[in-house]
Amino acid sequence: MKLPRKAATALASLSLAAVALTGCSGSSSDASAATSTGTSTSTSTSTAPTADPASLSTDTHADADDGDYDTTGATTIKLADGASTVSGSGASVDGDVVTITKAGTYVLSGSLADGQVVVDSPDEGKVKVVLDGVDITSSTTSPVVVTAADEAVVVLADGSTNQLADSAASGADDEGEDAPTATLFSMADLTIAGTGALQVTGASNDAISSKDGLVVLSGTVTAKAVDDGIRGKDYLVIEGGTVDVTAGGDGLKSDNDTSGELGWIRLDGGKVTVSAGSQGADAVGAVAVTDGALTVSTSDEGVQAAVITVAGGSVAVTATDDGLNATSHTEVGGGEQAEDGVLVTLSGGTVTIAAGSDGIDSNGSAAITGGTLAVSASSGGGGGNGPLDVNGTTTAQAGLLTAEAGSIQACQQVTVTDASGKAVTSFTTNGTSMSLIITAAGITSGQTYTVSAGQSEIGTVTATDATQASTGMGGGFGGRTRH
């Protein structure tokens, strides 16, 4: 049962029939939004918190040229079972374990059926580990471990395919505080760069993890894990490349819970696809998307953090529970009280959500001031069970469209055009449901719009202002598991 709606919101909504949560494989939302001619702001005695997307970013350790390297003077390491060799300084071989002890560039090739590469460099300066056709498996521990380094950079050589894998038995050494809990594990800041490909399989725990910051600059990275896919404790930033994550736990994760240093995730570019058993992207502090494409095809909750910001790019989420869940985890079991510092801000880009419960669930406030939002949500889950569930103040763009449009299916192109035939917004749905809400810059109260799905016209309706669009029940504690 829903509580009375509390926050005044201006939205464009479509009422649909049928419920289905379906990820659109290989597709990403596409939107073309005109400049908004008006907005509607909720009337409330409290002031909604504001968040500048840039303020959610902190300088990372990575440099744009981290993927560059010079083989002149580099140490060459050829991996082979029982016969690995080192040509140059800074590395040594002991059986099937290769240890790098100095800053510098190391070019690796070959394979180890049951071995390990360890970086243990107390020196200042970056350790660049270039993978040029590497295949390493370990039956007892993590195959690549950075125990100490100023910074570690894994470079994927141009045209190379590289594979790292552990076994289920590798988890036996995961109990210590600084134990290597991922197939590619680093105690230091870690950067992944280059134009090659890397496939990482975590059969015992996580696939890729850094106890500091983790930045993906480029490359094709595939991470499969029984627990979390890619984790950067302090932060996880993806600036480019193609990243594909399949995880039994969270897909993308940043879990530093130290006050003033809360973990954050940021997508500045690239194409990221996540299939997760828990959260698609989960950060204690903030998740921000400024560019690129994030597709969460399977999840419990798609994106979860105290502050969620979409300023550009595209986000397509399919979730059995909430699509975007903003919470500080201070209210166990939910409630109507707004949490301080909790905010969802959509100021640009395109967000499409197919959710089993709430589309956007904020235990604080929400500000939808730009871009395109399309939410399809069922009515059979928990929480507020609506497109928007906001405990605090909601601010949104003007324009409300209501039409019976049960023929819109998942993965269809939906276009909204104005009276002149100009497209106001266009996007690909990732689910069908009993309700679909669309809000986009350029939809103005009092104006008439035509909604089409594929080549079929669904209907022509006049936009009106919406004064109540939030169920106001909040999302409670959510599903975070701390490690």
Image (spheres, rainbow, N blue to C red):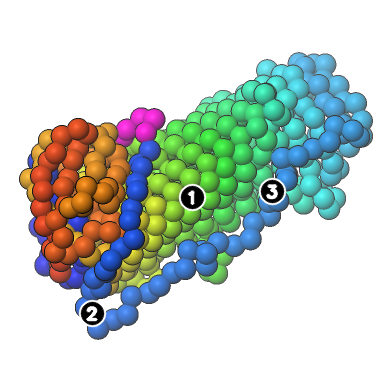
> Mark 1 or 3 closer to N-term?
3
Instruction: Kindly report which numbered mark, 1 or 2, lies closer to the viewer in this rendering.
Output: 1
Instruction: Give residue 419's position: percent from left, percent from top.
Output: 17, 52
Q: CA distance from mark 1 to mark 3?
A: 17 Å
Q: Secondary structure at mark 2?
A: loop
Return the x and y of residue 372 as percentages of the image width and height. Answer: 31, 53
Image quarter in which the N terminus is found: bottom left
Residue 100 shown left or right of residue 389 in the figure: right
In front: 276, or 244?
244
Q: Which residue is mark 3?
A: 64
- Report the span colored magenta: 20-27
Label 3 near label 2: C-beta < 8 Å?
no
Does 277 sit above or below residue 307?
above
Residue 22, x across and y down, in percent: 26, 34
Sooner in the amino-acid sequence: mark 2 or mark 3: 2
* Residue 55 place in picture, x, y as percent: 52, 67
The residue under label 2 is 44
